[in-house]
Amino acid sequence: VDFDTFAMAHGNLSDLVFLALLAVVGQFFACPHTLFQDVGPFKAQFKAQNADMTAMIKLAGGLLLIIGMMFSSVKWNPINGKMAGFGAFASLGYTLYSLFQLDGAFVPRLLYAYIGVVLLGALHIFAMPSNPMPKKTPETKNNHGNFSDVIALSLLMVSLLMFFYPKHLYQDFGPFKAQLASESPDLTILTKFVASLFLIVALMFSGVKWNPINGKLSGLGGFIAAGYTGYSSYVADGETIVPRLFYIYAVVLFLGALHIFAFPSNPVTPKPEKKE
């Protein structure tokens, strides 16, 4: 077997995308107010900061962290990046079009840059992955039909609801109180962006054969995103637990992270011994 089959996942374009997304996550988590200000040539992305916008920005930051860590930790090959890459093209393309429509013309805003970074990563894993297909072995299971797909289907449902029925975020459902208070053009765009990120994460969960190595960094990102989302919701409600949808999202992300971090469905493909 050629050693190139086991090329390291690090040091390629995926890592550059990861580092760029890490900087975006830092902004979303630590300096969300900068999204409401002009930054150099970029006009303010959003107009008015409120509790709803802050909640969605933090959720977006967590999802970007997961995506960045998945970009970096997975050995992308001609198969495992196809679904996530296509999902990114379709969903983020729609979000870009919606952003353009909202302004009525091209206005340089940070969201264009952030979407561009994710699309660059999607192009890499879809069309120019850094690793060839590994050889199939009896120990390597089919990726589908395991817990990763359960998580993927759950996140796919969240994404589709945000895209096609975003009003559910503003409504009470049984014991669950409305997640958001009032609609606005900025919140609509941000919701579409978050829906795109959920779709990408879902397809990465489903498309990758998770093993004890490639799931560690991605799982860590999931733990951070889930914990921060849940904690932020708790603080936003005056440090009381009010049942809202974001808690469900946090639980699903946590369970997916736990699966790929501690209970992946595939073993690590063993490295062959060097030939004398």
Image (cartoon, rainbow, N blue to C red):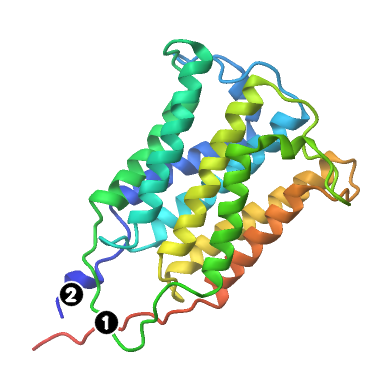
Residue tagged 2 = 3
Q: Do the residues labelled 2 and 1 touch (CB within 8 Å)?
A: yes
Q: Which mark is residue 225?
A: none
The residue closer to the viewer here, 275 or 185, is: 185
Residue tagged 1 = 271
- Position of 260 relative to 270 (above/below): above
Q: Where is residue 35 in the image (x, y as percent from the top left)?
A: 59, 24
- In primary-sequence order, the first of circles 2 and 1 is 2
Q: Can residue 109 be seen in this view?
A: no
Q: How crowded is mark 1: few (under 14 residues within 10 Å), some or many (20 or more)?
A: few
Relative to 98, 275 lies left or right: left
Q: Position of residue 271 (x, y in %)?
A: 27, 82
Mark 2: amino acid: Phe
Relative to 45, 49 lies left or right: right
What residue appears at the point 56 percent right and 47 percent down from the top-left corner?
Answer: 63
Q: Residues within 10 Å of mark 2 (few under 14, many from 20)?
A: few
The residue most toward the top is 104
